[in-house]
Amino acid sequence: MSESTVLPTTREKTDQDQKTKRQPPYNVVLLNDDDHSYDYVIIMLQQLFGHPPEKGFLLAKEVDTSGRVIVLTTTKEHAELKQEQIHAFGPDPLIPRCKGSMSAVIEPAPG
């Protein structure tokens, strides 16, 4: 190790970790509509969130029956990014009347 390399002290690491841990969690909530198929939802959740098809199906079923489903809980900044990605995913090619992406909101998660 060269003399110019400075490693953070334990206190600096702890302070940094504390900042990360204090960020309040946010939920990314997918909202139901009648213009997207289960296949679309499953593929979108797989591509954007890495959910396996089985979990994607369960989430698609929940959004269909309850009108909304939490697909991710994360930091506010990351939740906003994921919301934008959902909004940019595009129309469902399996449903001709579909004109655009699904909708999602972000909400503070219970702490």
Image (spheres, rainbow, N blue to C red):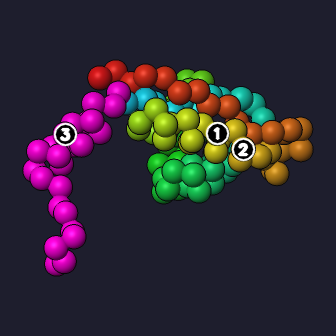
Residue tagged 2: 88
Label 2 secondary element: loop
Q: Is residue 49 left or right of residue 5?
A: right
Q: CA distance from mark 2 to mark 3?
A: 36 Å
Q: CA distance from mark 1 to mark 2?
A: 6 Å
Q: Residues within 10 Å of mark 1 (few under 14, many from 20)?
A: some
Q: Quadrant of residue 100?
A: top right
63 is within the stretch colored magenta: no
**In which quadrant of the rendered image does the C terminus lie?**
top left
Label 3 secondary element: helix
Q: Quick check: 94 above or below 108?
A: below
Dot 2 or dot 3: first in sequence order is 3
Give how far across and how far down residue 28 sits, in percent: 51, 33
Label 1 secondary element: helix
Give how far across and how far down residue 53 sits, in percent: 53, 56
Q: Tell me if residue 54 can be seen.
A: no
Please identify the residue farthest to the front as the structure is shown: 4
Tag 1 and tag 2, C-beta contact below 8 Å? yes
Q: Nearer the viewer, residue 59 or 46?
A: 46
Dot 3 or dot 1: first in sequence order is 3
Residue tagged 3: 15
Q: Is residue 56 left or right of residue 91?
A: left
Where residue 62 is drawn, which disc sits there?
A: none
Q: Quadrant of residue 3?
A: bottom left
Residue tagged 1: 84
